[in-house]
Amino acid sequence: MTFLEKEAGIVTKNHYRSKWLAVGMAAFGIPMGAAFGAALGNMSYLSIGMLFGIAIGVNVGRKKDKDAAAENKVLDIEI
């Protein structure tokens, strides 16, 4: 799948959503949760930040999937 994605920009259904879910959780969610936890003095708020990160990642991925579908570069399979 990497060859098709890199060379032609062709991806499977929900490819970007799946990829950006993990990126959002790691890049946005964990730092936001750590900031909430440190500010409020309770690190159990880490999970709230991760939820925000997942939401951000899913929305970014959904937008990229929609753009790929508009360009007719989506295979009708889901892996």
Image (cartoon, rainbow, N blue to C red):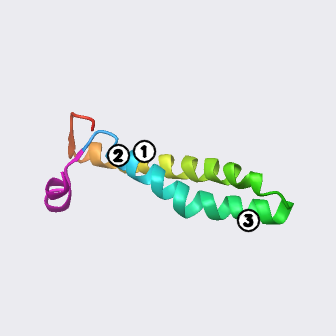
Viewer-nearest of discs 1 and 3:
3
Could you tell me which residue is drawn at 82 percent across and 57 percent down?
A: 42
| Image-based side of 62 in relation to 12, left or right | right
| Image-based side of 71 in relation to 64, left or right | left
Binning the other alpha carbons within 10 Å of mark 2 as few (below 14), some (14 to 19) or many (20 upward) gives many
Please provide the residue range marked out in magenta.
1-11
Q: Are marks 3 and 2 in contact (CB under 8 Å)?
A: no
State the image coordinates of residue 58 (x, y, percent, origin top left): 49, 46
State the image coordinates of residue 73 (x, y, percent, origin top left): 20, 46
CA gap, disc 1 to disc 3? 27 Å
The residue under label 1 is 62
The residue under label 2 is 65
Residue 75, by quadrant, is: top left
State the image coordinates of residue 12 (x, y, percent, origin top left): 25, 42
SS at badge 3: helix
The residue under label 3 is 35
